[in-house]
Image (cartoon, rainbow, N blue to C red):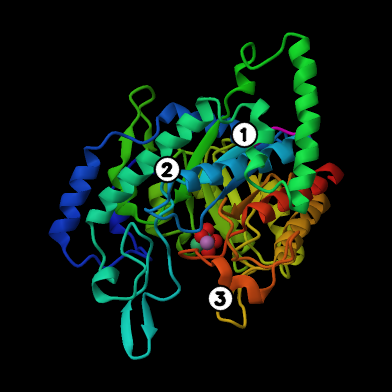
């Protein structure tokens, strides 16, 4: 990092995917207020996540990063709990069947901003600004709903704070206690194929816990059985917002973006000379960067040098999203080059964004088999290069939506209409997510 970095040096650089805020005064006012708000996360927590990700980089743990494509301001407490529960269920499956600790990171408590392929959306002869996530505007197709509203930056902060508060309560207050893993299933998927498989595994874990209890080991003697570490993350897209929540850590003097534990750079904003890379290289949080099918070896190496010049393990996660058709050809050269450069990255597979298509009825969707196929190709590429397939990055919800096709229930395209609720990309529902976890655990076992 050059010595001239400050939280606002990005302002002098080319930047993409920022809203056209109609009122500069309103924006300044909102940013000023945000700058006075308490941080959402503490720098020590971000350092803890870096340490846990360093274990992933060394091949000693697996990363599960998951949540909505675009979070809603209207998520109910039940919906937040159910999303957490599905992620915890997937983590239990991966830990138990894969035999490894799982680092759990939600796309949650701040995943409100979306880059869009076009800045405008046209319906008939009406053209309006695209929906850019509820941190900017609303999804309804009227002029007032689509007007970027800087007040929403503050609402996003408050929604993130209340979501995070609930997550902290659930993960520290007993909901995540390992002895609860069969109750998580009760109101969920017990009757589906994934649910039955999960129930069997939960019974085995319960028996193991009873045995350990008889030996004097239980959640009162081992706090790790009672609590889980659960971290937050989102795409750091709106740099105004991120800058306003960036604080100097009083313990170390380092800068942290305190809007989430981990921040990632999206596929559309990873330009080496651009604002997003500049902003994120200066904060000490663990970072992610999406790596799509057009990324070259030189670009990826330059991103590693820019974002992690000190080669700190756990600092950088490269989230590949090549598409099922490309992953087996595109990934090995990237893995080999990064391996040979000595950069200790976490490699995670986003099997969602390279496999989206529009179904006949007009819904954007993804097929479960293609998602799984990209993950299988990801594991194969790592096996080939002797590198560690470190994790997965998926879009999911605990709600019973019909957005992705296939899976244990073999959801058909004709059924997409039943509960298509996403504000952006199609998400796996709870059953499909647990299904996927079992299949990824099998890949982990054979690795
Ligand atoms: C996303 O993760 O929702 C996203 C927009 O992904 P990408 O930057 O990989 O396109
Ligand atoms: Co998405």
Quadrant of the drawing holding the N terminus? top left
Residue 363, horizontal then vertical, whole percent: 56, 75
Q: Secondary structure at mark 1?
A: helix
Reading the image, the residue beneath label 2 is: 1
**In the drawing, does residue 215 fall left or right of residue 7?**
right
* Distance between mark 3 and mark 1 Cα atoms: 39 Å
Element marked by disc 3: loop
As drawn, the residue found furthest toward the left would be: 25
- Front residue of 124/229: it is 124
* Relative side of 327 to 28, left or right: right
Magenta residues, start to end: 98-102
Left or right of 35? Residue 306 is: right
Marks 2 and 3 sit apart, C-alpha to C-alpha, by: 44 Å
Measured as percent of width and height from the top left, residue 419 is found at 55, 66
Seen in the picture, residue 344 relative to 406 is either above or below; the reply is above
State whether label 1 is within 8 Å of ligand 1.
no
Query: Quadrant where the C terminus lies?
Result: top right
CA distance for labels 1 and 2? 21 Å
Q: Which comes before the other along the chain, label 3 or label 1?
A: 1
Residue at (56, 30) in percent of width and height: 175
Against 379, is 366 above or below? below
Nearest the camera: 293 or 160? 160
Query: Which residue shows up at 25% across the image and 37% down it?
Result: 37
Disc 3 versus disc 1: nearer the observer: 3
- Who comes first in sequence, dot 1 or dot 2? 2
Labelled disc at residue 54: 1
* Residue that label 3 marks: 363
Residue at 32 percent of width and 40 percent of height: 246
């Amino acid at each position: 990092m050059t010595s001239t970095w400050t939280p606002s040096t990005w302002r002098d650089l080319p930047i993409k995917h920022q809203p056209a805020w109609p009122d500069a005064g309103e924006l300044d006012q909102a940013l000023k207020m945000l700058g006075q708000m308490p941080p959402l996360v503490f720098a020590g927590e971000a350092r803890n996540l870096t340490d846990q990700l360093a274990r992933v980089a060394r091949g000693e743990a697996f990363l599960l990063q998951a949540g909505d494509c675009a979070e809603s301001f209207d998520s109910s407490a039940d919906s937040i709990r159910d999303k957490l529960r599905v992620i915890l269920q997937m983590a239990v499956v991966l830990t138990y069947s894969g035999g490894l600790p799982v680092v759990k990171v939600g796309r949650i408590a701040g995943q409100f901003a979306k880059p869009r392929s076009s800045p405008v959306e046209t319906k008939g002869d009406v053209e309006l600004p695209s929906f850019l996530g509820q941190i900017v505007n609303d999804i309804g197709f009227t002029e007032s709903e689509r007007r970027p509203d800087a007040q929403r930056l503050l609402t996003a902060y408050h929604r993130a704070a209340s979501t995070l508060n609930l997550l902290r309560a659930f993960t520290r207050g007993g909901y995540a206690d390992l002895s609860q893993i069969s109750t998580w299933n009760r109101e969920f998927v017990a009757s589906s194929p994934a649910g039955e498989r999960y129930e069997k595994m939960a019974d085995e874990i319960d028996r193991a816990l009873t045995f350990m209890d008889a030996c004097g080991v239980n959640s009162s003697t081992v706090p790790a059985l009672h609590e889980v570490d659960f971290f937050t993350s989102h795409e750091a897209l709106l740099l105004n917002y991120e800058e306003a929540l960036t604080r100097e850590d009083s313990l170390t003097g380092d800068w942290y973006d305190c809007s989430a534990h981990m921040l990632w750079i999206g596929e559309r904003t990873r330009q080496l000379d651009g604002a997003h890379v500049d902003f994120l290289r200066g904060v000490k949080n663990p970072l992610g960067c999406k790596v799509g099918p057009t990324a070259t070896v030189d670009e990826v190496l330059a991103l590693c040098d820019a974002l992690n010049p000190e080669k700190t393990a756990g600092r950088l996660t490269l989230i590949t999203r090549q598409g099922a058709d490309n992953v087996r050809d595109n990934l090995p050269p990237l893995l080999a080059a990064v391996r040979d450069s000595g950069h200790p990255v976490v490699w995670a597979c986003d099997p969602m964004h390279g496999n989206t298509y529009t179904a006949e009825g007009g819904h954007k969707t993804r097929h479960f088999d293609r998602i799984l196929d990209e993950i299988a190709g990801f594991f194969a590429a790592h096996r080939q290069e002797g590198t560690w397939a470190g994790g997965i990055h998926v879009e999911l919800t605990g709600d019973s939506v019909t957005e992705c096709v296939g899976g244990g229930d073999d959801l058909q395209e004709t059924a997409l209409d039943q509960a298509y609720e996403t504000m952006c990309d199609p998400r796996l529902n709870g059953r499909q997510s647990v299904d996927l976890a079992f299949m990824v655990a099998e890949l982990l076992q054979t690795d």
